[in-house]
Image (cartoon, rainbow, N blue to C red):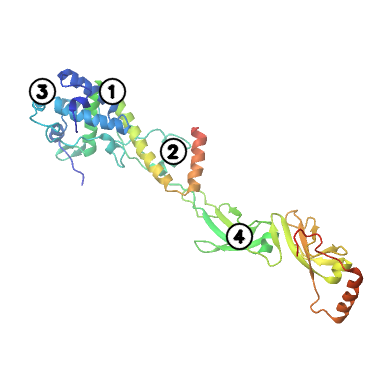
Amino acid sequence: MAGDPYAALGLTKSASDAEIKKAYRRIAKTDHPDLNPDPAAAERFKAASAAYDLLKDPEQRRRFDAGEIDEQGQERPQRRYYRDHAEAAGNPYAQGYGFDGDPDLSDVFADLFGRRGTGGFGQGGTRRDFHMRGQDYRFSLEVDFMTAARGGKARITLPEGGDLEVTIPKGVRDGQTIRLKGKGGAGMGQGGAGDAYLTISVAPHPEFRREGDDIFLTLPISLDEAVLGGKVAAPTVDGPVNLTIPKGASSGRRLRLRGRGINGGDQQVELKIVMPPKIDDDLATFIETWRRDHGYDPRAGMKVGG
Amino acid sequence: MTRFYSETEVVALIDELTPPRLQTYLRAHIVRPVPTPAGPGYREADLARLQLLCDLSDSYDLPEDTLRMVMSLIDQLNTARGDMRALMQAVAAEPDEVRIRIHHSVRHSRG
């Protein structure tokens, strides 16, 4: 305690012994740390309790008032607080507080904290059979683009050894998690097995690209196909499909194959005109002649000058 | 090794505790010392409990059965507080995802 012990009790030096006792009891009622969790209350109680220990003895009070001893009085043993023991693990007076009889929660409660007496005697008690659900497993699994698009099977190796065949659902997306119920670790007692969670990453494909359920593909076409139009075979995730190239199609033209994406999505085909590997004399001569009468400016529509 | 205090030591250590008062608490089974060959042995927890019992007796003039009931409530509360602390520490050590799930569940049932 530091400072004026009378002030700690809310009194002055002129207080009577009875007033001192009364003031201390009033503070003890409201601020006792075993009854009031507020740290400020604990400080008030500590100060009042030290003050009371000093002033309750009339001889000691007289000596303090006379300045013979300071407010520390004399060495006194550290005051004990029950709470320091009561909250601690293994407190012999630990008591259950109502979950033991709860039909839904008693098992969970006993698993966590064990069983306790519900008052009076008979502490400890026996632990019930231990039940715990098995551990969940988490895996990452990379699947190729086509397996993700069309669905299929994959195998994973389990932590306890052995492997597990997994069905990859059609159209699984990159980053999607698949839950395999009951494929996690074994449970204890009557606890069920845990689940396995597979996080799927989809490997990219050299030709196909996927956005949601739509598939994007760039399809090379020849110069003559671009000029004259015609039917060409376009690959899709479910195999080749005939695609009609309109007469005079430019590079970048987009064509839609309805329902040829994933799960009802579309496939978008972007055309790309590819020149023959070698421009022969026939083609060069023809184009020169053609240009004389049919020259056109494909950049006429551009917003910036060339 | 737990240190045990004798009855005489306990009465000497706690100012407010008198032998008749101690007998009252023992009769009401509010304090339960450990039987040893040398007589009842009091642990630190018993000493702290006796100090609180004296404080309660002095402040409130409680009859024996009321005191017993109050101590039972205090024990329940402190046990719950210790359990809650352990549970909170366990929750605090869990990843965000788990803490958020617990948060939602608790908010749902406790408003």
SS label for mark 4: strand
* Same-chain status of marks 3 and 2: yes
The answer to whether residue B30 of the structure is visible from this angle is: no
Answer whether labels 4 and 3 touch (C-beta < 8 Å). Answer: no
Q: Which mark is residue A106?
A: 2
Vertical placement of residue A223 versus A118, above or below:
below
How far from the left and from the top, in percent, is residue A100?
41, 36
The crowding category of the residue bearing disc 3, from other C-alpha atoms within 10 Å (few below 14, some 14 to 19, many at least 20), is few
Residue corresponding to mark 4: A201
Dot 4 amino acid type: Ser
Q: In which quadrant will I find the C terminus of chain A?
A: bottom right
Q: CA distance from mark 4 to mark 3?
A: 83 Å
Q: CA distance from mark 3 to mark 2?
A: 55 Å
Chain for disc number 1: B
Q: Which of label 3 and label 1 is nearer to you?
A: 3
User: Which one is closest to the eye, mark 3 or mark 2?
Assistant: 3
B80 up-or-down from A241: above or below? above
CB-based contact (under 8 Å), mark 1 and mark 4:
no
Task: Name which of mark 3 and mark 2 comes first in the sequence.
Answer: 3
